Image (cartoon, helix red, strand yellow):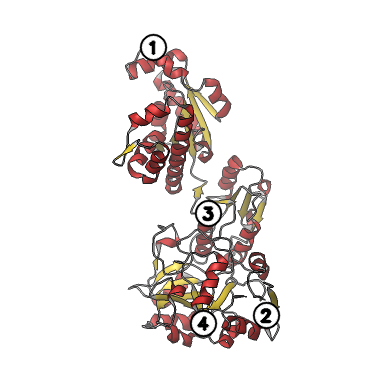
Amino acid sequence: MTTQYLSAEDSTTPQIAAEIIKNGELVAIPTETVYGLGADGLNPDAVAKIFAAKGRPQDNPLILHIADAADLEKFCHSIPESAWALAEKFWPGPLTMVLPAKDIVPKCTTAGLPTVAVRCPDCEITRQIIRKAGVPVAAPSANISGKPSTTTAKHVYHDHNGKIPLIVDGGPCRVGVESTIIDLTDEKPRLLRPGGITVEAMAEIVGEIVIDKAVTGSIDKDTVVKAPGMKYRHYAPECSVIIVDGSTEAAARYIKKRYQPGNRVLCFEEELDAFSAFAPLSYGKEADTDTLLAGLFAALRELDDPSIGTVFARCPAGSGKGMAVQNRLLKAAGFHRVNAERFVLGITGGTGCGKTTLLKAFESIGGVIMDCDAIYHELLKTNASLLYSIEDRFPGCVEAGKLNRKKLGAIVFSDPAALADLNAITHGAVKAEVQRRLEVASTPVAIDAIGLFEGGLYELCDATVAITAPLEDRIARLTVRDNITTEQAMLRINAQKPESWFRENCDYILENNGAAIDFQEKCLAFFDKLSIIKKKA
């Protein structure tokens, strides 16, 4: 298929585009938000072509675009006064309303729901196309599903050249992110997706607005949603994205610790100098949220490069229009965000060295301990996916939903390859759970793990420390603590990594070579040195 490329300034373009839509084909249309992949929203065959072209899940509803607010009555019923008031204030504009759908709207457009999302775009040529076509235009963003949205015709050409009949070039999109979506079918208005129209502005007209949990967090894949952009990972470049919260200085320290060649930083224009060593890309000014809205998707598309490993992204506060930027970045990052102000200390070392003293000292200054061994055993009770993975690799080791540790141990401790397979399963699950807990932690955290490095947990840490102790002290502790012989204690010690390994791999070493009270003071002095936290008053 040859894709036409027509300018919005050409007077013949609206009629050409309208004819293509009336014939059941696709047209990429400009709007003030993003470019849309448009088709006759009342034609199931045409709508199906949208889903096919984008690779879009069938349970992700589409938005109907109309030319005038009066057209609401053609496609919706039981329209509340709040909808008319919002339309009078914000239409044409970047606002979508979810309302009860009339039977004329096909179920493929609404993803089988009794509601339909409708908006009137603030783009003259697109409204002309809709009027000339004589039908509402269903038009999700014109990107391949899950990828960063299209804010220029060039972006659309990259994704769909040779796949659709026409691209209408209306220049760069003014707003730059998809429309705000508000659901008016519940008792209280509910924000389903933030955009260029803020919650604060709408609340002046409709009163209190409930913020749907999909705006700030992930939701279950089986959840039925009323609007696009709520459930699936969206707006994402091919690489992984991590949102780094906190001051510029704290973020720079965090990134420096983890930066690898090929990584990038997505930041505010004001921060370019601070991140100059990390290949930074600005997407706008923190002091001017409109520039962030307009620049976000273009920047994410530039970062959609398989040679890039990780993008560390800076995000504005989540109020006003900043909520829309934060929402898109959260989706792009799969809700992976870290607080650079919160210090994460990885603690490891051989058995009998005295980690318990360090951990108690850490708790005494307000720190939180994440015991990875305890987390693993919790996951065995609560994480069905983990149990399934173990059973899949080691059939018969999960009985009635519980792990038979004796049977599993008999397999893995006599077979190094089997043990490596088990570690690959368990390390991944534990790391994912630790990462989840870190995202909501507000105080300093210590990750306690013998396999701190083997499980990749060190990657989550700002610093790592190993506790060492003289051999004779370790043996004495183990024989008393575990009621074992000297020979048994030596077998345990020799089965673990030598002290030289910890010295080579950890950032810090704390030697526990004196009285318990002396080591406790050494631990507290160590925390002060790292400026982890101030002692409680």
Say whether residue 531 is visible: no
In terms of depth relative to the viewer, which is nearer, 169 or 195?
169
Amino acid carrying label 3: it is: Ala
Q: Are marks 1 and 4 in contact (CB under 8 Å)?
A: no
Q: Secondary structure at mark 1?
A: helix
Residue corresponding to mark 2:
8
Amino acid carrying label 4: it is: Pro
| Residue 279 vertical placement versus 356 (above, below) | below
Q: Residue at x 37, y 27 (%)?
A: 410
In terms of depth relative to the viewer, which is nearer, 48 or 207?
48
Q: Quadrant of residue 34?
A: bottom right
55 left or right, relative to 8: left
Q: Are marks 2 and 4 in contact (CB under 8 Å)?
A: no
State the CA–CA distance, disc 3 to disc 4. Answer: 33 Å
Q: Residues within 10 Å of mark 4 (few under 14, many from 20)?
A: many
Amino acid carrying label 2: it is: Ala
Sequence-earlier tag: 3 or 4 = 4
Residue corresponding to mark 3:
333
Q: Nearer the viewer, mark 1 or mark 4?
A: 4
Q: Are marks 1 and 3 in contact (CB under 8 Å)?
A: no
Sequence-earlier tag: 1 or 3 = 3
Residue 304 rendering spot, x and y as whole percentages: 63, 56
In terms of depth relative to the viewer, which is nearer, 161 or 82?
161
Sequence-earlier tag: 2 or 4 = 2
Q: Nearer the viewer, mark 2 or mark 4?
A: 4
Residue 86 rendering spot, x and y as whole percentages: 45, 80
Residue corresponding to mark 1:
486
Q: Residues within 10 Å of mark 3 (few under 14, many from 20)?
A: many
Residue corresponding to mark 4:
136
Amino acid carrying label 1: it is: Thr
> In which quadrant is the C terminus drawn?
top left
Residue 273 rendering spot, x and y as whole percentages: 67, 51
